Image (cartoon, helix red, strand yellow):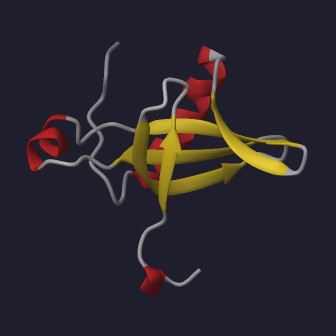
Amino acid sequence: MSADFGNDILTLEDEDGVVHTFEVLDTLDDGEKRYVALSPIYDSPDDMLENSADLVIMQVSEEDGEEFLETVDDDDELDEIADIFMKRLEQEYDFAEDDE
């Protein structure tokens, strides 16, 4: 895909019916599973400044030939994938370490 087309944007609806918009930052295929790193897009500049360090990692799953995104429930798996994404994205984005 050419950079001339701009960033990929996803609009997702959560289980409560709330719609969220994300920019796709990166994708990762480890041979068994596929993951996507997303950054929320906020409606107001104030929300953007308060939450600018958010990185959302989802697993790409397939069911009946349709792809969908789901959370990564295994904390060790999530930490490992997050580390990979952060190393890959650190040239383009300034991540603040979260001690939680």
Q: Position of residue 24 (x, y in %)?
A: 48, 56
* 93 relative to 7 in the view: left or right: left
Q: Position of residue 28 (x, y in %)?
A: 65, 50
Residue at the image point whose x is 49% and y is 24% from the top: 16
Q: Which residue is at a point 40% across and 49% down the rendered structure image?
A: 21
Q: Is residue 56 above or below residue 9?
A: above
Quarter occupied by the N terminus: bottom right
Q: In the current view of this chain or complex, which residue is farthest to the right? A: 64
6, above or below 85, in the image: below
Q: Position of residue 43 (x, y in %)?
A: 21, 49
Rendered-image quadrant of the C terminus: top left
Q: Nearer the viewer, residue 18 or 83?
A: 18
Farthest residue, direction top: 100
Query: Is 14 placed left or right of 54 in the picture?
Result: right
Residue sitting at 38 percent across and 51 percent down?
90
Work out whether residue 79 or residue 12 is closer to the camera in this orientation and state it: 12
Q: Residue 47 at x, y = what percent?
A: 16, 39
Q: Looking at the image, is 78 positioned above or below residue 22?
A: above
